[in-house]
């Protein structure tokens, strides 16, 4: 897993990693984000195929960025 530059999300502390692997011999990339809320931790996980990751990365970040926690 490789960390990204994400350290906060909507004013909440966060850590994000790109996790690469294979599912049934298909290379995939997961964008795994852990967010620290006031009294809970949240996980947001998005994924795509490895070949589509660079093209989809911005959209995946937009989806992750839409998270609203407390």
Image (tube, rainbow, N blue to C red):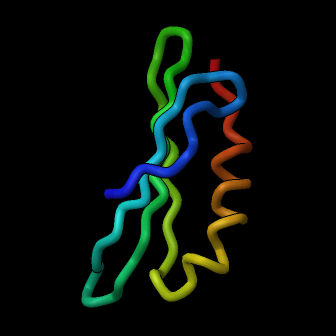
Q: Position of residue 8 (x, y in %)?
A: 61, 31
Which quadrant of the view contains residue 55?
A: bottom right
Farthest residue to the front: give it.
Answer: 5
At 54% across and 18% down in the image, what residue appears?
37
Which residue is most to the top? 39
Count of residue discs: 0
Res 59 quadrant in image:
bottom right
Q: Residue at x 65, y 33 (%)?
A: 9
- How far across and down, in percent of the image, does residue 29 sit? 43, 70
Residue 24 picture quarter: bottom left
Q: Residue at x 43, y 59 (%)?
A: 18
Q: Which quadrant is the N terminus positioned in?
A: bottom left
Q: Is residue 3 above or below residue 29?
A: above
Question: Is 22 drawn above or below residue 38 in the view shown?
Answer: below
Q: Is residue 70 left or right of residue 16?
A: right
The x and y percentages for residue 64 are: 64, 48
Q: Position of residue 38 (x, y in %)?
A: 55, 10
Is residue 53 placed above or below 18 in the rendered structure? below
Quarter placement of the C terminus: top right
Residue at 50 percent across and 51 percent down: it is 4
């Amino acid at each position: 897993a490789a960390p990204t530059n994400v350290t906060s999300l909507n004013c909440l502390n966060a850590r994000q990693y790109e996790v690469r692997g294979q599912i049934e011999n298909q290379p995939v990339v997961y964008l795994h984000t852990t967010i620290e809320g006031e009294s809970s931790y949240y996980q947001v996980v998005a994924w795509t195929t490895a070949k589509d990751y660079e093209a989809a990365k911005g959209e995946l970040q937009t989806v992750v960025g839409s998270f609203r926690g407390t």
